[in-house]
Image (spheres, rainbow, N blue to C red):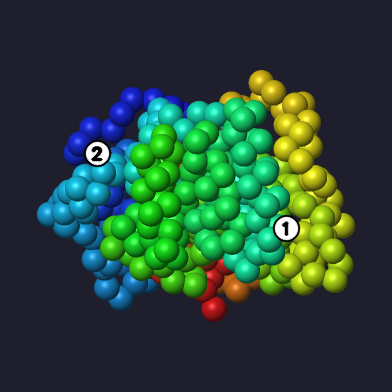
Amino acid sequence: MMNVAAGPRLSDRQRLNWLRLIRTPNIGPASFRDLINRFGSAETAIEMLPELMRSGGARRSAHVPSIAQAEAEMETARKFGARFIGVGEADYPPALRRIENPPPLLAVKGSSTVFTPTPVAIVGARNASLTGVKMARMLATDLGRDGCVVVSGLARGIDTAAHQASLPTGTIGVLAGGLDRIYPPENVGLCEEIAKNGGALVSEMPFGWEPRAQDFPRHNRLIAGIALGLVVVEAALRSGSLISARLAGEMGRLVFAVPGSPLDPRAAGTNGLLKDGATLVTNARDIAEAFAPLAGMRQEPSSSLQEPPDFAAAHPPADDDRARVVEALGPAPVAVDDLVRHTGLHPAQLFMILLELDLAGRLERHSGGAVSLHA
């Protein structure tokens, strides 16, 4: 099984092959985990990819980055002052390690010691009001003074204010693109300050990757996963901050919201969160009181990290088995346990078929482990 607890460091060879595997098209955190669980190493998994993709119905194999290409990205990271940290290593963010399908590798610039204190995310509107900015600064300053580290997404407005106020006590900036592609550009200086002042910049995207609109939900998931709680200061009804709040709730994180005027559209999202059960926040003490009952419970492993099936206990799937699974799947998400009962296949056979479909680009994975076929 892929090591999901803090353990030994990856060797240089392992890190290189992990990078090659996660940079291969159609391979995300879930399929990466399944490949490592099935074949024991990224190196062996890479060798098996062409056969697996053909079995899943791919017309051609995806391009696996060469050793030279992976070495070039690692050299780019080194020159940038960054490094790649694997999910099983001790300096990987502890809370992120325990979410469903954590990123196998994170690019990190700065100090990984900033991951140790209690992480609290502060997010909100890019077009923030002066009151919102002042609130974000106050919360970030007081949380830092209380021993927390502030996590945010480096966007204009609330995110920037939270990072700036928490520079003296440590802050974690999450990027939607590569670490060398800061967005917005005016925060390049802020990013340098974060790294120099004991904080950290993190990204799961390749170096040189320009952030796109479709990358921000993944970016929001990273913010929610690193933090143990998430505070929304201002957010409109259609806001990326609300996506972060939803993801945080699904991960079992505490969700907080600052109330605002019903006349201000930037408060519509936060007021909606409060109606839905988020904890009302007017100062950092509200956050500390909500965390108090959780003291001593933060290192419990997540129940979503399931043991892989015993692949040696079943024969490899046959073409008839694959056809049965494809027939059972459709555009609506279904639970894997329901698929096992419906098809009568051994869990190991079903996992292999789902992995083949995923690698062929035909499978979509949903929260909670549900799957569907791409429409």
Q: Residue at x 59, y 72 (%)?
A: 330
**Closer to the camera in the image, 30 or 73:** 73
Residue 216 against residue 286 in the figure, above or below: below
Residue 320 against residue 43 in the figure, above or below: below
- Cα separation between marks 2 and 1: 49 Å
Question: Is 242 displayed left or right of 321 in the figure?
Answer: right
Which kind of residue does numbered mark 1 sit on? Answer: Thr
Q: Which comes before the other along the chain, label 2 or label 1? A: 2
Q: Secondary structure at mark 1?
A: helix
Which kind of residue does numbered mark 2 sit on? Answer: Gln
Total marks in image? 2
The nearer-to-camera label among 2 and 1 is 1
Q: Residue furthest top?
A: 296
The residue indicated by pointer 1 is 131
The residue indicated by pointer 2 is 14
Residue 73 against residue 172 in the figure, above or below: below
Dot 2 crowding, Cα within 10 Å, few <14, some 14–19, many 20+: some
Question: Is 371 displayed left or right of 269 in the figure?
Answer: left
Q: Quadrant of residue 274?
A: bottom right
Residue 223 is situated, as x and y percent measured from the top left of the image, at 55, 50
Q: Quadrant of residue 271?
A: bottom right
Q: Quadrant of residue 263?
A: bottom right
Q: Residue at x 84, y 51 (%)?
A: 277
Question: Is 82 displayed left or right of 242 in the figure?
Answer: left
Residue 87 is situated, as x and y percent measured from the top left of the image, at 41, 38
